[in-house]
Every structure is written in C-alpha cells, then in structure tokens.
Image: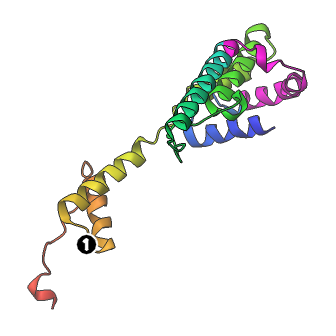
Amino acid sequence: MEAFWYCESIHRHLGYAAFTPEFLTGMKKELKLLVRHAKMNYNWETAPGSKAYNDRLARKGVARAKAAERRAQEGRPDPARTRVSIYTSWKEDAGERSRRIWEWWKDRVKSEDDFKFFKTAVRLVALTQVSSASVERVFSQLVRIKKECGETMLEETVFLRLLCRLHSDEDIPDVPATVPADSE
C-alpha cells in the first residue's frame, strides 16, 4: 500500500501524465498480486551484480585491515573520521540496497504481464532525478554575497540580496537606494 501511496504522491507533486485516474485504478487492481510477490522468498545474495559487489566489499575490507596494521606498526592512530563510509554488508549501503531492489522489480516486470501499471510507475519513479542543485545554488549565492559584502550585514539585508540574486531573471521592481525626501 505504501508503494501505491508513493505513486499517488508523485502524481500530485510531479504531475506525470501517465498517472491518470484509470492508471491509478489499474495499479490498485495489481496491488494484491504485488503484495503476494513481495512476501515470497527472494535470494538477495544471488541478485545480478551481487557477487561483484561482495567481492569489492571483501577487497576493501582486506585493504582497510592492512592499512590499520601499517598504522599500528608505525605508531599512528586510526583516523577519527573518514569521508568514506565503511560498510560490512550490502544492507548498510543505500546505493547497493537500492540496486538490488531495482533487480527485484526487473524480475517482476520482465516475466509477468500482471504488472502492466506498476511496470510503468516503477520506471517513472526510478527515472525521477532527485537533485540538490537548487539548494546548492542558494548556498553558492549566499557565500558569494558574504564574500563580496562582508560578514557584518543584517540578516534581512542578506536575505534581500539573496532573493534578488536568485530571482534576477524575473521582473523585480526597482527598490530605491535611498528614502525619497518627501516621505519624511
């Protein structure tokens, strides 16, 4: 049911034309069989690409152990933090877990004509690009403003400058630099 809710949510927020009321009704009809498939045993360890991932994980583990041994011999402490996440299983690795879930879906939709609507929905969801580019743009502009104008500006001034920079391609009315004399 969560998958269905997610697809309805995507329809509302992203406006995919494929998610018509008829399409959503078709998904509801497929849901019972999909739940049965989800409850079946599936060997995640034999999903395509799993062996290659497990081999890489084992090689990284050996390399980390050797590096730790070298540091110990040289009397250097273990680094407190690393930028690289250390996984001991594919279940801890969000990317690998997602890839295996994708493989599970591929198995369902390639061999079954029963999931016509979910096949389309899953492809659309998987192809939806999640991006932080807009947030990165805001922070980039904020850094630029602080660099050009200094750190002592009022919060409201920073906010106004940020809005002007972010919406510079839109038609923004001119704001007078000084208060007109007749307004006093």
Q: Which amino acid type corresponds to the residue marked 1 in the rendered image? A: Met
> Is residue 155 shown to the viewer in this render?
yes
Magenta residues, as a range? 22-51
Seen from the viewer's position, the closer of residues 106 and 98 is 98
For label 1, the residue is 153
The answer to which image quadrant residue 28 occupies is top right
In the image, taking residue 154 as reference, residue 43 lies left or right, namely: right
Write the residue at 57% across / 26% down: 66
Residue 68, image x and y in percent?
57, 34
Badge 1 local density, few (<14 within 10 Å), some, or many (20+)? few
Question: Residue pushed farthest left?
Answer: 181
In the image, taking residue 27 as reference, residue 160 lies left or right, namely: left
In the image, taking residue 66 as reference, residue 165 lies left or right, namely: left
Write the residue at 64% across / 18% down: 53
Count of marks, rendered view = 1
Q: Classify 53 as above or below 2.
A: above
Question: Residue pushed farthest bottom?
Answer: 184
Residue 160, image x and y in percent?
29, 66
Write the residue at 57% across / 24% down: 63
User: Is residue 100 covered in magenta?
Assistant: no
User: Which colour style is shown?
Assistant: rainbow
Residue 149, image x and y in percent?
19, 64
Q: Main secondary structure of the magenta part?
A: helix
Seen from the viewer's position, the closer of residues 86 and 13 is 86
Quadrant of the image containing the C terminus: bottom left
Q: Classify 19 as above or below 180.
A: above
Residue 67, image x and y in percent?
54, 30
Q: Dot 1 lies on which element?
A: loop
